Image (tube, grey):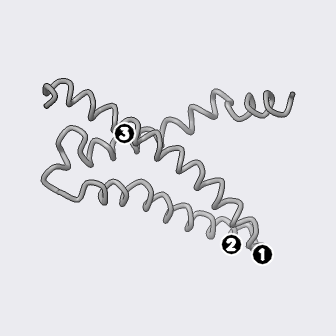
Amino acid sequence: DLPPRRATELSLGLSLAVAGVVTLVNFGIKVAVTRLTDWEYRDTRTEYEESLYLKLSAAYVLNQSLLVLLVAPDVGRWFEPGGAMQQAFFIALSNAVVPELLKVLRVDYALRREVLGR
C-alpha cells in the first residue's frame, strides 16, 4: 500500500496523463473529421459547417465525457482523488488551454519548418 500523500500524487499524475492523451486524441479527431467533411462536397459553407460541428460535437462528447464515465462507473468514487471528476476537470482544462497555447507558440509552423526545410 502507498502512503496517502503518495497515492494522491500518483492519482494526480495519472489524471494529468489521461488529460494529455484525450487532448491529443481530440486533435486527431479534429483533423480526421475535417478531412472527412471536406470529402462530402456540401453545397454551401453553412451546410459544411453544420456537418462539421455536428460530427465534432458528437466525437468530443464521446471522447471527453462518456469515456471518463465508462472508465469510472462507480458513482460513489467519482469525487475521490483520481476519480471521474478530477479526470474530467483536467481533461476540460487541457482542452481549453493546450490548443490555444499551441496557437501562441506556433508549434505547427516550427514543425513544418523543421520537417519540410530539410
Q: Position of residue 35 (x, y in %)?
A: 71, 60
Cα–Cα span, label 1 and label 3: 39 Å
Residue beneath disc 3: 90
Front disc: 3 or 2: 3
Q: Which numbered tag is attached to residue 75? A: none
- In space, the residues marked 3 and 2 are separated at their CA atoms by 33 Å
Q: Secondary structure at mark 1?
A: loop
**CB contact under 8 Å: marks 3 and 2:** no
Check disc 2 and report its element: helix, strand or loop.
helix
Q: Is residue 76 above or below residue 42?
A: above
In the rendered image, the quadrant that contains the C terminus is top right
| Left or right of 105, for residue 78 | left
Task: Name the residue: 63% across, 64% down.
Answer: 52
Q: Which mark is residue 47?
A: 2
Q: Nearer the viewer, residue 48 or 86?
A: 86
Q: Nearer the viewer, residue 111 or 41?
A: 111
Give, as a three-letter code, the residue at label 3. Phe
Could you tell me the amino acid type at mark 2? Glu
Residue displayed at 73% across by 66% down: 45
Question: Which residue, given by chain and number where applicable, does mark 1 sit on?
Answer: 43
